[in-house]
Image (cartoon, coloured by chain):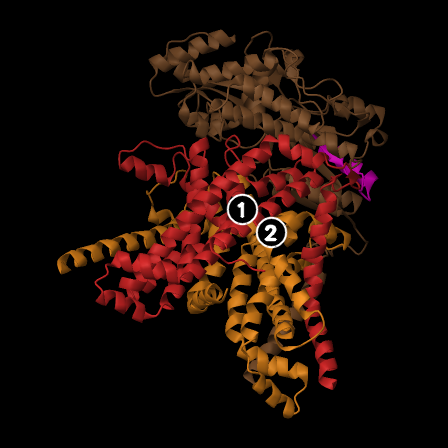
Chain colours: A red, B orange, C brown
Amino acid sequence: MKKKKSDMIMGYSYILPSLILICIFAIIPIFMNIYYSFTQYNILTPPQWIGLDNYKRLFSDPYISSSLKNTIIFTLVTVPVQSIISLVIAAVLAAQFKNKLGEAIRSALFIPVIASAVLVGTIFSLFLEPSGLFNSALNALHIDSVNWLGNGKTAMFSVIMATIWKNVGYFLVIFYAGILDIPTSFYEAAEVDGASALQKFVHITVPSLSHVIYLVITLGTIWSFQVFDMVYTMTNGGPGMSTVTLVLTIYNSAFKGFSMGYAAAIALLMFALVLIVQRLEAKLFDKEEK
Amino acid sequence: MKKDNVILRKFVAAVLVISAIAAVFPFIYMVLISLTQKDTLNFDFNFATMSLVNYERVINNFHLLTNLKNSIIVTTSACIINALFSSMAAYAFAKKDFPFRKQIFAVFIATLVIPGQVTMIPVFVIMRGLGLMNTYPALILPIVNAFGVFLVRQFMVSVPDDLLDAARIDGCGENRIFFTVVLPLVQPVLVSLTIFTFISSWNDFLWPLVIASKPAIKTLTLAIASLKGSYSTNYGLVMAGSTFTFIVPFLLYVFLQKQFVEGIALSGIKG
Amino acid sequence: MNKKIVLTVLLTAFLASFAFASGSKESSDTSSKSTAKKTEMLLWLPPFASGDTMDEQFWSETLEPWEAENNVDLSIEITPWGGYEEKYLTGFASGDGPDVGYMYMQMFYDYIQMGALEDLDKYFSQEERDNYYYYESGRMMGGEYALPFVVGNARVMFVNQDILDQAGITELPQTWDEFIETALTIKEKVPGAIPFAQSWADPSIGILDDNFYPYFWQAGGKIYNDEGTQLTLEDNDAALTAATFLHDLRFKYDIVDESQLGLTNASDAFKAGNVAFANLPANKAKTMDEAGINWTFIPSLKEKTEGIWVASDALIMNSASENKELAASLMKYITSGPVMTAFHNDVSQFSPISKDEEYNDYPAFKDMYSNKTEFFHTLPVAKASSSISDNLSKNLQLMMMGEISPEEAISRTMDYSKNVL
């Protein structure tokens, strides 16, 4: 009896700090956001109710359609590519290179992860300048220089490239740990059956990692939808609208367009999309959570 | 057969080594450029003329030391607060029974889905209302989120109740039990959480961009962005600023590499 | 035991950091030289220096006498061009904005609407107003909200005389057609040269000032209606003519080629010496001299008429300032003859703004600034000017990349403007 009461008191008091912060910084803001999305708000003067105007604007705004298109393309390319590359490298390292070399390679590949996206974006911007390192290297191979960040088609590709380069090391670590967890007996049995490395990979490694693959893909998707730092630093949405993304548009609407209400509407749109994609991915991996 | 395998193995090793170099090379190049005054980005390096002058300028004219101080204060505080609050809440959810425990936890988890950009503007307005713009708390507090609670709780669950009961029988107060018995037991996950918090708050960009307009409070990540924005053609200068920002997480990684990797692996397996 | 110590240390550090936190709210510079309480004020200016002089140094030294005389502790912040508008918005929103700041035309509409800027008329006597050349240019939306500060810096057509000589061209082109002919001749006769450099990859709205508006005005266009509430790009065919001209330069005549589309800085290209023509700000003149370029310039080409983009950036006073009289005094000091002379000589060349100042701008432009003023255009103060400019510049970029036609570029901008206005 006494324990129950003291349990209760302690329980509530121990969750209180987190609870307060989460209320203030996550829960209340969601509701505020919903409210703002129905207003015209420029932060210096009080919000004015405008009903559904912001939502109507969503449908005819070319920045929104570009943002959606670009963010989706970005996600559809980045997530599979970075997941596959990190998975393959992890598998190869776990199978053939459980030695100092393998360790060194994993360490090296992880270094881009600890740099900020702004830092990576800055370095890549310099590399990709018309007279920058990439083109110097291409020229040495007798290939013409490419206008990486000035050309609509290659700009998005450049941002994707920089993002994948940065993320591979992180997922590599996760996959590697996951593979180490797979009982070696599985592989030994397959070896006895005469399975090749590729077969072992496809029929043992991948299925055993389904939980981890799900994590990697979900995490990667969320990160991709939120892409901002890289784009802001490398291209700022240009050239044209080829690299305009959802978060960039939210930011520009709020802080350059004096339309916090509109930005709130876009943010809610993005939130809805993330939830939908999450649902789809959960279904795909059969991980329905009631 | 075997010979093919050896050649294949060497080929694969070569590919891997090349990719490892590709991962590291840009940073090496960054440091090299930061020591020069070059106009063009190529491979001509005159080692004789290299100097630290860009670093001098970056510190004297651009107040990068202030930014460094701010980044350190914000990141360290965030790590400590997050670890403390998250483990407290995790302990309560895992070991204490109280009304609505399940429901409150579900709400915590639900907030994990909310992207930061969705809450950015309301939090900005809240900060302004609280008079906290351009202050350290404004930069530190929003970093605390439910992820830490989620992560630590996974480990809290496996803390043996017998141990706790034994401590109680010994006359230990509940709070004391938490600090002296429980926390040490979940140390690995706390380290893991701290590393996550460290990396994400050191490199945080959008939120500081929005809330920290005064130079006195700006963090390093903001500093390099504006350095690049205003002086993009002064490669040496921009790279010096970038190196400066990168040094701290890099040194931490070099010394705590094992913990970094374990931390991320842990979250992958349990998550 | 060890763990207890560690925990205690951590908790202490955590508490200490909070002590830090409350301390950080105060401003970082404290001057404790005089015993009298100094008024604290904040000045925001953008960077103008090219690299040898540092802006902050110049202003601190130059404004020190004013500070001393008025017993003010003046904090000077050089606000970078990147994220400029956001900084102003968050600054004003948080109440941490400057007493005196600097805005360009696209920013004014919303700030005036929000009541964020102070009307300056009451702080300037008639005599003081008459002393300025451009005081009346700062009158907008019913009040004097801007004190013109950087005026001029016309965008003119810089010409590399050496390349023209090599191509055997003796006369500078005066019309669009002559320009195309000249550029084609250069393309033929001087293979290594770039006939015309335009920075199409620059993501800022400034590219319109260099690449589009001059031609738009030369074709007889007007950007907004008089009230500044409607975009009037389709009222006549000027926008289409100008856009088509630019489009043709790339796709019809191949004068502007693919490499231009990656150019973010046409002046760097011109400085390198192999560019024949480039639309550049007049204040690049000194830079080109220092780089040893043998250059001349054409103030404006002619289509229907001539048209020259000139800046009219201004100092503003924050209506939330607690020291308005002092702010006005600071503005007068900054724009005074001696300070402006020093600024134009040491930091960046611009036209004189008051009668107290000699013409310290680049000598070659003096004639233009005296005699071509009828063709000068400044950007209008209008609603959503910044977003619409951004949209227009992006659409023109798409056009130059060949993804949309000139007609589409204009119509999309018009549609967007209806969306926003």
State the image coordinates of residue B29 (x, y, percent, origin top left).
38, 49
Q: In the rendered view of the protein, which quadrant contains the N terminus of chain C?
A: bottom right
Q: Nearer the viewer, residue B166 or A253?
A: B166
> Does residue C354 appear to the left or right of B237 in the view shown?
right
Per the rendered image, the range of residues in magenta is: C314-336
Residue at image point 76% right, 20% down: C227
Residue at image point 65% right, 83% down: B176
- Residue beneath disc 1: A225
State the image coordinates of residue C57 (x, y, percent, origin top left).
61, 43
Res B51 visible? no
Please, what is the three-letter code of the amino acid marked with disc 2? Pro
Q: Nearer the viewer, residue C90 or A268?
A: A268
State the image coordinates of residue B208 (x, y, percent, origin top left).
62, 51
Please, what is the three-letter code of the amino acid marked with disc 1? Phe
Q: Nearer the viewer, residue B113 or B138?
A: B113
State the image coordinates of residue B251 (x, y, percent, origin top left).
45, 63
Q: In the rendered view of the protein, which quadrant contains the C terminus of chain C?
A: top right
> Does residue C83 appear to the left or right of A73 in the view shown?
right
Tag 1 near tag 2, CB within 8 Å: yes
> Relative to A144, does residue A4 appear above or below in the rendering?
below
Q: Which quarter of the figure has residue B38?
A: top left
Res A220 visible? yes
Residue A225 covered by magenta stretch: no
